[in-house]
Amino acid sequence: MRRIETLDHVYQGLDALCATDRRLVRVREVAGEVPLRLSEPGFRSLASIIVSQQVSRASADAIFGRLTGLVDPLDAEGVLIAGDDIFREAGLSRPKQRTLLALAEAVANAGLDLHHLCRLDPADAMRALTAVHGIGAWTAEVYLLFAAGHPDIFPARDVALQTAVGHALAIEPRPGEKALIKLAESWSPWRGVAARLFWAYYRETRGRDAAPIAPVSPSPA
């Protein structure tokens, strides 16, 4: 697996996508800057994704900021010793508290290595992540996309991606998960760059931050 770790890798992927699917040339023109958005693998990165589920970017940033201030460093051990009052003060819902605790338990006591997962085949990594209570496919895919830098992950459950692809390619109603998975197959092996492209397109056409938007109920988290 070639990790997407520089903007040059993103540009390479965009060039390949536009050569394969000419519809994406206009999408790229509208999208403008397509950011790298690479994060450091590990507990903190995955915790940030869990916090961001089903809330606005502003709310997620505020909650995560409070959480990192209360649990410092934000790691598995810190979460396991944090009490319920700290989670409530941070503004975490009960399901997200349970997911963070389950993740912390898996990392601290069950041998889950979030760095090693980034080097695995995506199917194996997905199985390991979704085995943790509360972590669904969307959360696992976003982690592999941005922490592992996987070049061929496309979170088809993502509401912003469904909206952006539907708008850009004039598909009404917007494609659902199954339709988007099938559509994105033609963008392999650069589906991770295609996801970045359509999030940037969403930003430009909707006037909103292009952060991934979880489906309404991807998991108990």
Image (tube, rainbow, N blue to C red):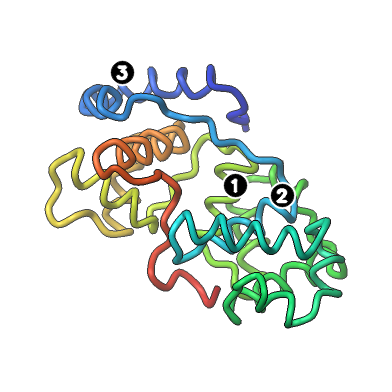
Q: Are marks 1 and 2 in contact (CB under 8 Å)?
A: yes
Whole-percent x, y for residue 164 in the image:
27, 45
What amino acid is labelled 1 in the image? Leu
Of the two numbered discs 1 and 3 on the same chain, state the one appearing first in sequence: 3
Whole-percent x, y for residue 59 in the image:
50, 61
Q: CA distance from mark 3 to mark 2?
A: 32 Å
Name the residue: 76% across, 65% down: 70
Give the crowd class for mark 3: few <14, some 14-19, many >=20 residues within 10 Å: few
Give the crowd class for mark 1: few <14, some 14-19, many >=20 residues within 10 Å: many
- Of 97 and 15, nearer the camera is 97
Which type of secondary structure does the marked residue at label 1 adopt? helix
- Of 70 and 194, nearer the camera is 70
What amino acid is labelled 3 in the image? Ala
Read off the residue under disc 1: 144
Which type of secondary structure does the marked residue at label 2 adopt? helix
Specify the label residue 7 is tagged with: none
Read off the residue under disc 2: 117
Name the residue: 49% across, 38% down: 152
- Of 18 and 90, nearer the camera is 90
Read off the residue under disc 3: 19
